[in-house]
Image (cartoon, coloured by chain):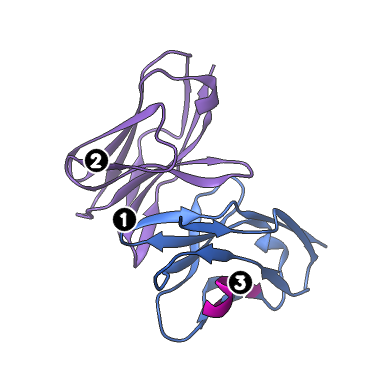
Amino acid sequence: AQSVTQPDIHITVSEGASLELRCNYSYGATPYLFWYVQSPGQGLQLLLKYFSGDTLVQGIKGFEAEFKRSQSSFNLRKPSVHWSDAAEYFCAVVVYNQGGKLIFGQGTELSVKP
Amino acid sequence: DVKVTQSSRYLVKRTGEKVFLECVQDMDHENMFWYRQDPGLGLRLIYFSYDVKMKEKGDIPEGYSVSREKKERFSLILESASTNQTSMYLCAVGNRYGYTFGSGTRLTVV
């Protein structure tokens, strides 16, 4: 069955430090992959998406993600974290042979230390 | 860009009540989705619809039903609300190339 795993439930990093959030997916075909961010009390905001082509995808707010087919991964990275990046981050895969439904991981909550 | 509107931001209902959550889009997208969001569980798909009067069960359909009589409106129905249905409910519209989410309805069942 299709699934998304975010192994880290909660991560704390210092402001200015680099960040990597892990995402592993299980899907038989070429995946369509998304990263969303949700700040406290806010809705979901799209950070970036991957369909095909270049495996390094640039997103908003200085985020990037790299698609690695051999590892079934789509990890999110940022070189220098800002306090405003504290939020919950969700990775998702599209099951496009089933109505295009979006399957989410459990989420990773990011805390930023001053 | 499509705008997705959920009718209520906060809702408090009693156990056993029938509850309707409404979602409206302002474009002509075929696919609409209902998710519930719970801490530590992420977003889980309840039901989705790929056209008027067409629906498919998601991963957690028990205790819920849906209605899509018009293309722009997708309703989630809790036939008999229970306390374990207290959650944040999110509606989404889109396809493999992109999705737009509503701002959510926080439902509390007491």
The total of numbered circles placed on residues is 3
Percent from the top left, x then y, of residue B68? 22, 38
Find residue B69 and report its image quarter.
top left
Instruction: Determine whether, in the image, residue A64 is placed left or right of residue A112.
Output: left
What segment carries the magenta color? A67-77
Tag 1 subunit: A
- Give SS at disc 3: strand
The span from disc 2 to disc 3 (Cα, nearest Å) is 35 Å
Instruction: Name the kind of residue labelled 2 in the image.
Output: Arg
The span from disc 3 to disc 1 (Cα, nearest Å) is 25 Å
Look at the image and give the colour of chain B: purple
Quarter of the image containing the C terminus of chain A? bottom right
| Label 3: how many Cα within 10 Å (few below 14, some 14–19, many 20+) | some
| Residue that numbered label 3 is attached to | A75
Please, is residue B76 above or below residue A47 in the view? above
- Contact, CB < 8 Å: mark 2 with mark 1? no
Of badges 2 and 3, nearer the viewer stands 3
Percent from the top left, x then y, of residue A103? 46, 54
Residue in view at x 35 percent, y 46 percent: B33
| Residue that numbered label 1 is attached to | A98
A69 inside magenta stretch: yes
Find residue A38 and report its image quarter.
bottom right
Tag 3 subunit: A
Looking at the rendered structure, which numbered label has been put on residue B73? 2
Residue in view at x 40 percent, y 47 percent: B102
- Give SS at disc 2: strand
Instruction: Name the kind of residue labelled 3 in the image.
Output: Asn
B110 inside magenta stretch: no
